[in-house]
Image: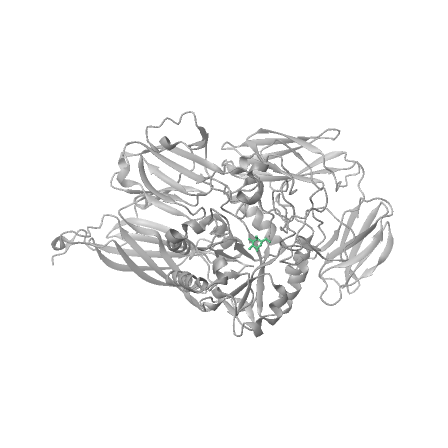
């Protein structure tokens, strides 16, 4: 065999010529959209000039309107679904000839069909998976090309929660050389972690897109490949590097190259200090740089133990997690990095350290943020397998797609330090028959072939180990239990030697700022499946005292007390961190969003947020509920959540109502108080010294509007957001807790009004409206920056109210 070396070996002094490496461009701008079916739109010559222009990501469902006729689809969120078409005309430069071009979709809900210049590239039913198509062979270089995408979410119901519809995640155009690092082609692990040194191992899959698989064996070309990997610390200082040489012949399509790099004195990644290293991988063919990719990584160890529970870097740690659906409340499913970051910041401030991506692979941006902000992630694959939960759900695509979808999820997400557990499913119906064994084993096997560094679980709703077939498969590394908190104490007895993870807990119900008295009993609502949708009060609001839960769950305090008590219970994921669209339990339409959140749909914490904060953080917490605006003489239960103190004393108008101390495993204290207008003041003390003071004042009539922005300077990138909280104050400046005034907004300058909401589960006003009624004294207006720098003026007016304005900067 004669080898022709196309390049001679040179001593490599550097890796110049970076413009030859891959180019990844956002492909979000300049799309045309049509809501409805238009089969001819796949043809390049189709005239889309009358279609709406927009930029991605885009979720057409969130644009509304809310309507009862949509309340059976999207699991009763009341928002429209249907079919939509997207088209984009773009020019590929002549200079790109010889390159390979790909389009990458982070997620399209659902059933996408992608056409390039009239050629079908593929279809993808799964609405949460990321996928890539190669465009090259159908492209016209130096000319215009048309990509057309049909998105079909018309078959309803196909989800148990609000899914959104459309190309709701980012899209990328990636230009690569024929010799490149494969799609999701780098696997990075940290098998050895010691104080003085950590070893990073890389497996790099190199692809030759022009391999001559059946070519002439006598004229084989050898590529003298080099992989140069450089590791940078968080200050951008180079801390390690390595070069690996390998020959690849042009008659093979793929070759894996293995490399190990040693990082001296590694700084560990943890939820408190999420230290990130940047790993740059450069692929060189001879002297030519052909590809380059950078991966963020964190160095950490963790362990689940049947007796001791979970530890991170050797430190016993409770998983204080929440389940999150993918919607961003009023922004719908359309991915916005700042909106995800805000959700995570609110959760972080509460002391939450883990997210379960219920019940589907998340947006890549969520994982990037969790890496950076210090959250552990349970990355979940499916809400159903072959047996459906809804008529048109993924079960219909199961046979054809589950292997590829699961593989793609693992390949995409396995380098994230935040991801610590894979979940192969939520409350899967195959728990109850023997296919739970076979499918369970098959899925775990798929995961393990691609990643052996993380445990696999499945969120089981049948807690009887003798009857649960997925558990019986023996394939799960962790026993994930949903609800059934009453059996947790007996876990070691019922599941000898097994490791526990609480995959889903609580399903407590609350509306922010709404209170029912008295609070002595716990109510389950609905009380049984038969009683689903029992109507309670006309407001269709649920009291915000933590004493109402769905019958399959518990109040927040009930389950947390159990999880807290036993070390073998590694932790839990509360259902849910935030309210989400769809699944309005216990009320039906016109309720359109869930009551389960610790935080409401607009991002305002409900009172129980402070219970978690008092338990999960060391920040001094003293929170009183409810508000102090009642009918004279009414008996009101005053709850206080507190920490870092021995006792709390409550005063009404300067008169002490007594000292309360948490007893046993109490998580709050209570006073029953006859209402009289004025000031309620609480003081927490430790060893006789004041730790914190908190007061609630009876408010007078609504008098003036107050605006409060979470950030007053936002980036002028057309994406960044300022979340502005709107409250109404009385003449003395006290917030009016029950205010429900209608507020109108006017935005001028370098920004636009993106959405409004008040967090009420029954608010049917369009999120795109320029006005919003307050609910329990609050509403939210979201301002989005434009592409141009400049000032943004926000004005809020309301009948009979002093208006308010606020200046923001788009910079
Ligand atoms: C669980 C389910 C969740 C959600 C929740 C509501 O059983 O896993 O997806 O439906 O109930 O309480």
Q: How is the image coloured?
A: one colour
Spot occupied by residue 519 in the image (x, y as percentages of width and height): 76, 55
Q: In the rendered view, does 248 fall on the left or right side of 648?
A: left
Question: In the figure, 525 relative to 790: above or below?
Answer: below
Question: In the figure, 72 relative to 188: above or below?
Answer: above
Q: Looking at this view, is 90 or 634 the one in front?
A: 634
Q: Looking at this view, is 314 or 497 the one in front?
A: 497
Q: Residue at x 78, y 48 (%)?
A: 696
Q: In the rendered view, does 469 fall on the left or right side of 187?
A: right
Question: In the figure, 704 relative to 557: above or below?
Answer: above
Which quadrant would the N terminus be assigned to in this image?
A: bottom left
Q: Looking at this view, is 565 or 22 the one in front?
A: 565
Q: In the rendered view, does 557 fall on the left or right side of 56?
A: right
Spot occupied by residue 421 in the image (x, y as percentages of width and height): 48, 61
> In the orientation shown, which residue stands out farthest toward the front?
530
**Quadrant for ligand 1?**
bottom right
Spot occupied by residue 233 in the image (x, y as percentages of width and height): 45, 56
Spot occupied by residue 148 in the image (x, y as percentages of width and height): 37, 35
Residue 102, by quadrant, is top left
Question: In the figure, 541 relative to 316: above or below?
Answer: above
User: Residue 781: in sight, yes or no?
Assistant: no
Q: How many marks?
A: 0
User: Residue 69: in sight, yes or no?
Assistant: yes
């Amino acid at each position: 065999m004669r080898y022709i070396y196309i390049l001679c070996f040179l001593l490599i002094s550097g890796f110049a010529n970076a413009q030859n490496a891959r180019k990844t461009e956002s492909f979000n701008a300049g799309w045309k959209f049509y809501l409805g079916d238009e089969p001819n739109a796949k043809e390049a010559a189709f005239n889309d000039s009358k279609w709406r222009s927009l930029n991605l990501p885009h979720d057409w469902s969130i644009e509304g309107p809310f309507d009862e006729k949509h309340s059976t689809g999207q699991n009763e969120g009341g928002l429209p679904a249907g079919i939509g078409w997207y088209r984009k005309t773009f020019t590929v430069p002549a200079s790109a000839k010889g390159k390979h071009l790909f389009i990458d979709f982070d997620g399209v809900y659902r059933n996408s069909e992608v056409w390039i210049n009239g050629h079908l590239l593929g279809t993808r039913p799964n609405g949460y998976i990321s996928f890539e198509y190669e465009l090259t062979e159908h492209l016209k270089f130096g000319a215009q090309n048309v990509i057309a995408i049909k998105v079909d979410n018309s078959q309803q119901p196909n989800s148990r929660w609000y899914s959104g519809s459309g190309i709701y995640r980012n899209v990328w155009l990636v230009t690569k050389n024929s010799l490149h690092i494969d799609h999701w082609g780098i696997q990075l692990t940290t098998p050895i972690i010691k104080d003085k040194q950590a070893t990073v191992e890389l497996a790099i899959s190199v692809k030759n897109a022009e391999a001559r698989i059946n070519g002439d064996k006598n004229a084989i070309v050898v590529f003298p490949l080099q992989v140069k990997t450089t590791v940078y610390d968080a200050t951008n200082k180079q801390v390690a590097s390595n070069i690996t040489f390998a020959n690849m012949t042009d008659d093979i399509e793929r070759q894996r190259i293995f490399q190990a790099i040693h990082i001296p004195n590694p700084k560990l990644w943890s939820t408190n200090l999420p230290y990130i290293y940047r790993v740059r991988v450069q692929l060189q063919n001879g002297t030519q740089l052909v590809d380059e990719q950078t991966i963020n990584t964190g160095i950490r160890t963790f362990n689940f133990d049947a007796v001791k529970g979970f530890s991170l870097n050797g430190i016993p740690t409770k998983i204080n997690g929440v389940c999150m659906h993918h919607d961003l409340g009023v922004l719908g499913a359309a991915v916005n990095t700042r909106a995800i970051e805000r959700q995570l910041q609110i959760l972080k401030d509460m002391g939450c350290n883990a997210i379960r991506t219920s019940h589907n692979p998340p947006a890549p941006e969520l994982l990037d943020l969790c890496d950076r902000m210090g959250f552990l992630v349970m990355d979940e694959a499916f809400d159903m397998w072959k047996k459906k939960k809804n008529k048109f759900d993924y079960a219909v695509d199961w046979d054809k797609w589950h292997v590829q979808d699961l593989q793609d999820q693992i390949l995409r997400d396995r380098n994230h330090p935040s991801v610590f557990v894979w979940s192969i499913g939520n409350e899967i119906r195959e728990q109850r028959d023997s296919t739970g064994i076979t499918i369970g084993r098959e899925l775990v096997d798929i995961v393990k072939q691609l990643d052996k560094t993380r445990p696999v679980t499945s969120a089981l709703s049948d807690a009887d180990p003798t009857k649960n077939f997925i558990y019986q498969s023996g394939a799960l590394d962790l026993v994930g239990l949903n609800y059934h908190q009453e059996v947790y104490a007996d876990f070691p007895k019922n599941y000898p030697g097994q490791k526990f993870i609480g995959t889903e807990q609580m399903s407590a119900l609350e509306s922010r700022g709404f209170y029912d008295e008295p609070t002595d009993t716990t109510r389950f609502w609905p009380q049984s499946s038969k009683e689903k949708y029992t109507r309670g009060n006309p407001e269709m609001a649920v009291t915000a005292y933590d004493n109402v839960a769905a019958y399959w769950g518990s109040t927040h305090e009930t389950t947390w007390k159990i999880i807290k008590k036993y070390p073998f219970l590694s932790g839990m994921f509360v259902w849910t961190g935030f309210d989400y669209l769809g699944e309005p339990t216990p009320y039906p339409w016109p309720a359109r969003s869930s009551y389960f959140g610790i935080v409401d749909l607009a991002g305002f914490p409900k009172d129980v947020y402070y219970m978690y904060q008092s338990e999960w953080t060391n920040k001094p917490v003293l929170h009183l509920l409810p508000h102090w605006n009642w009918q004279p003489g009414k008996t009101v239960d005053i709850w206080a959540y507190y920490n870092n103190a021995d006792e709390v004393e409550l005063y009404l108008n300067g008169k002490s109502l007594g000292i309360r101390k948490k007893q046993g495993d109490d998580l709050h204290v209570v006073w029953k108080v006859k209402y009289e207008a004025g000031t309620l003041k609480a003081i927490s003390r430790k060893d006789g010294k004041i730790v914190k003071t908190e007061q609630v004042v009876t408010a007078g009539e609504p008098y003036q509007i107050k605006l409060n922005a979470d950030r007053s300077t936002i980036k002028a990138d057309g994406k960044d957001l300022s979340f502005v909280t709107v409250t109404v104050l009385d003449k003395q400046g006290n917030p009016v807790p029950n205010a429900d005034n209608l507020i109108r907004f006017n935005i001028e300058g370098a920004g636009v009004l993106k959405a409004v909401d008040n967090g009420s589960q029954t608010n049917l006003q369009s999120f795109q409206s320029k006005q919003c009624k307050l609910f329990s004294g609050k509403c939210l207006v979201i301002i989005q920056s434009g592409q141009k720098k400049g000032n943004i003026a926000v004005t809020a007016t309301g009948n009979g109210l002093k208006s308010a304005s606020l200046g923001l900067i788009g910079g």
